[in-house]
């Protein structure tokens, strides 16, 4: 057993830390700290900065433009990014479609799309869920019918994150209704400028706009946009989901939240004393910190396993379940600590200059509500438990 | 023993229930709750006409209720409809004016909206810690300090303000026109104000208002907890209904035992919450009102969070949307813990009682 990083890994950590200190724009880090969301321009600027350094496509093989890092190096990079309040990179092109094209795409698709993901020329979004197909994704109904050298798509996708910024969407579509539902699904690439596509915003619980509905009416898509074989899309979907699971525990983000909560509890007062001296509130922080400390090691153990076995196993579902619950608890504490000062709806205050809580806390209640999504998306925590029951308990 | 409502209260409950479901549906509610003035003045007047405010004061003060069960009936119905009208301020002001003596008619008729200002940023939840001060000036007094999260303060014409006078918490009346306010809409709908007092003229109502403030807070806690019971029951009902309708893997998700049991756990917590509210309502005018208020608010704080979070989780993404009612019920259930003392504050009060 050796829990610390090797000398080379520590040197790498130092290199990343210094580069971030010199290159992460202050306004982008500040937007991360305040939690009021990044603009499209900020996301694109950070994407371009990482690309120019060659640190953008951290999971891609070297031949496609990846940095060739080990899982531990990737982990160090993510940890340092969180520490510096660098934003999480938009994952749809880089972490999802990229690996899919590398494994299943044709040479032409790889040559065309992969460089455009790196350059930022294409912003991809995901067309997976439908109103009737959430946890039961295989029941999806959006139809793609082959007509000559095109597919014609009709149907609806939903929960399309940041679709408002995207110019392309990768979709799971039904190309056959015969056999098991999983056997009639295909994976296809669609240009969002194609006639017949309408994107509508979904307003979320806290008032924000990050997800969308996408409607397809007689949308003609060239047949060469199919990835892999027709009716074999489910295999691709499952492959993509394993890649969606990188950094699934979100340990770095929970470490950020823990530090925010502690700092906040030192500043705000209850009964004339700092809140952190209140034993009931302090016990809430302590419980969350203990869970997080254990999660750091659980995360590293699974990382180590992935490094030696080549791929993450089904036990990563544990990281999703526990990681999201810890983060949600910390976001609860950040809201709770504010007391009555959590009440204002950000942006609905008659005097925008008035201060309620310590700096960067105006969005604490909104962030708590928004973060309820993390135990629902990417396979709800209930679905993760089903996976664990099947794979680990073999029941 | 009898756990049924009296005929009068049953009628009041039915009247409010019918009015709110007819006139204050979810679409209207979301329209007025998140836009200035964060309530509906016309519907406020109609609610007052129906007796929603008269029910909050006893007959000898000009009302027709004023007991714990009158308060819980009114607020449970407001909760069921997720109504953002500033009734809490009226209730607490009625308790304070009742103790101070004075004309209650303008308040109970709904003509003059009152808001109660006690909390401060550095002294939330407990008037004992407050820093706002009063001093005598001419015939009256002037107040200084900032009062925070004054619920209904965006709509109020009169503020009842707690401030320290000669080392004791005193109660003052401040006209809205005399005070500088910053108004805002709240995360969960409805409005509030920050009261920026700077030698603001005020009329002294009570020089030693400690007991009256405690009583107003106990009544306020009863109101919020009754509201929470209404909110939780509706949230639970929508969730169970959805579980019966929503199909995944070829069956309604309500067929999955893991979800069934969690829905039952919600139900159990809601029943416990209702019981505690009944207890507090019966003790509101007794010597142990403070202790039972603390127990009730602590219990409801935890139950409300559970119901809100589980309702969202069991729905899945749909309850994360603005369009779906559960998201707004969940916000109210969670933010209610930030009013009149959170779970930890009231747990602390219960614990303090053990030392006595």
Image (spheres, rainbow, N blue to C red):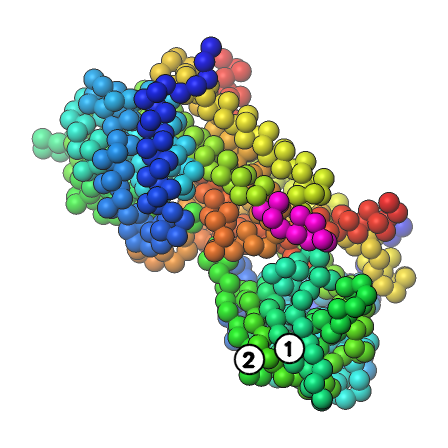
Disc 2 crowd, CA 10 A, few/some/many (<14, 14-19, 20+): some
Look at the image and give the residue range highlighted in magenta.
B242-252
- A356, B272: nearer the viewer: B272
Marks 2,1: beta carbons within 8 A:
yes
Quarter of the image where one finds residue B150 = top left
Residue located 49% across and 26% down the image: B274
Q: Chain of mark 2?
A: A
Q: Chain of mark 1?
A: A
Q: How many marks?
A: 2
Position of B184 compared to A282: left or right? left
Numbered disc 1: secondary structure: strand
Position of A21 compared to B139: left or right? right
Residue located 70% across and 49% down the image: B251
Residue located 23% across and 24% down the image: B63
Residue located 46% across and 24% down the image: B277
Which residue lies under the disc numbered 2? A196
- B180, A389: nearer the viewer: A389
Q: CA distance from mark 2 to mark 1?
A: 9 Å
Which residue lies under the disc numbered 1? A153
Q: Position of residue A110 (x, y in %)?
A: 76, 84
Quarter of the image where one finds residue A47 = bottom right
Q: Is residue B333 visible?
A: yes
Position of A309 compared to A371: left or right? right
């Amino acid at each position: 057993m050796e829990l610390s990083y090797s000398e080379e890994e520590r040197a790498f950590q130092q290199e990343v830390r210094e580069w971030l200190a010199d290159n992460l724009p202050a306004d982008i880090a500040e937007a991360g700290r305040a939690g009021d969301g990044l603009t499209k321009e900020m996301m694109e600027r950070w994407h371009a900065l990482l690309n120019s350094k060659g640190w953008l496509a951290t999971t891609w093989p070297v031949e496609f433009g990846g940095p060739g890092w080990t899982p531990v190096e990737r982990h160090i990079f993510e940890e340092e990014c969180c520490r510096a309040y660098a934003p999480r990179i938009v994952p749809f092109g880089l972490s999802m479609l990229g690996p899919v094209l590398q494994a299943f795409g044709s040479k032409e698709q790889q040559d065309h799309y992969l460089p455009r993901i790196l350059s930022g020329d294409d912003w991809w979004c995901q067309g997976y869920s439908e109103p009737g197909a959430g946890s039961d994704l295989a029941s999806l109904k959006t139809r793609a019918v082959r007509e000559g050298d095109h597919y014609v798509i009709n149907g609806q996708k939903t929960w399309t994150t940041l679709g408002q910024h995207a110019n392309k969407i990768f979709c799971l579509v039904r190309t056959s209704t015969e056999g098991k539902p999983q056997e009639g699904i295909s994976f296809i690439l669609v240009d969002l400028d194609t006639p017949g596509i309408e994107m509508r915003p979904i307003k979320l619980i806290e008032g924000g706009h990050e997800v969308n509905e996408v409607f397809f009416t007689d949308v003609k898509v060239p047949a060469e946009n199919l990835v892999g074989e027709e009716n074999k899309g489910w295999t691709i979907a499952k492959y993509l989901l394993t890649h969606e699971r990188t950094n699934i525990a979100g340990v770095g983000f929970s470490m950020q939240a823990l530090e925010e909560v502690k700092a906040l509890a030192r500043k705000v007062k209850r009964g004339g004393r700092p809140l952190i001296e209140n034993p009931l509130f302090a016990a809430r922080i302590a419980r969350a910190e203990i869970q997080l400390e254990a999660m750091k090691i659980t995360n590293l153990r699974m990382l180590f396993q992935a490094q030696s076995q080549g791929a993450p196993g089904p036990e990563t579902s544990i990281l999703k379940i526990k990681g999201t619950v810890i983060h949600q608890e910390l976001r609860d504490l950040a809201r709770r600590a504010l007391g009555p000062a959590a009440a204002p709806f950000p942006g609905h205050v008659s005097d925008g200059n008035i201060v309620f809580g310590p700096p960067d806390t105006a969005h604490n209640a909104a962030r708590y509500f928004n973060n309820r999504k993390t135990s629902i998306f990417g396979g709800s925590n209930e679905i993760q438990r089903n996976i664990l029951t099947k794979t680990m308990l073999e029941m | 023993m009898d756990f049924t409502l009296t005929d009068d209260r049953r009628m009041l409950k039915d009247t409010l229930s019918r009015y709110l479901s007819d006139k204050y549906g979810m679409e209207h509610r979301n329209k007025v709750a998140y836009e200035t003035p964060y309530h509906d003045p016309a519907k406020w007047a109609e609610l007052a006409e129906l007796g929603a405010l008269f029910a909050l004061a006893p007959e000898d003060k000009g009302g027709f209720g004023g007991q714990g069960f009158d308060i819980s009936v009114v607020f449970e119905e407001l909760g069921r409809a997720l109504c953002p009208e500033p009734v809490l301020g009226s209730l607490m002001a009625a308790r304070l004016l009742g103790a101070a003596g004075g004309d209650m008619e303008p308040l109970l008729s709904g003509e003059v909206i009152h808001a109660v200002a006690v909390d401060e940023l550095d002294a939330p939840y407990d008037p004992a810690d407050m820093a706002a001060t009063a001093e005598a000036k001419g015939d009256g007094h002037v107040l200084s300090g900032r009062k925070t999260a004054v619920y209904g303060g965006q709509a109020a014409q009169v503020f009842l303000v707690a401030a320290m006078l000669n080392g004791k918490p005193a109660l003052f009346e401040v006209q809205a026109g005399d005070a500088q306010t910053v108004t805002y809409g709240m995360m969960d709908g409805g409005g509030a104000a920050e009261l920026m007092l700077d030698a603001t003229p005020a009329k002294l109502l009570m020089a030693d208002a400690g007991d009256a403030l405690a009583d107003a807070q106990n009544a306020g806690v009863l109101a919020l907890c009754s509201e929470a019971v209404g909110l939780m029951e509706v949230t639970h009902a929508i969730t169970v209904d959805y579980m019966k309708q929503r199909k995944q893997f070829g069956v309604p998700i309500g067929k999955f035992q893991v979800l069934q049991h969690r829905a039952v756990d919600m139900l159990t917590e809601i029943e416990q919450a209702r019981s505690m509210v009944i207890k507090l309502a019966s003790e509101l005018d007794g010597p142990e009102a403070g202790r039972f208020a603390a127990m009730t608010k602590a219990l409801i704080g935890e139950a409300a969070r559970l119901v809100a979070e589980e309702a969202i989780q069991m729905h899945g993404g749909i309850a994360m949307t603005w369009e779906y009612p559960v998201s707004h019920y969940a916000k109210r259930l969670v933010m209610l813990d930030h009013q009149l003392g959170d779970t930890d504050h009231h747990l602390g009060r219960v614990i303090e009682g053990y030392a006595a």
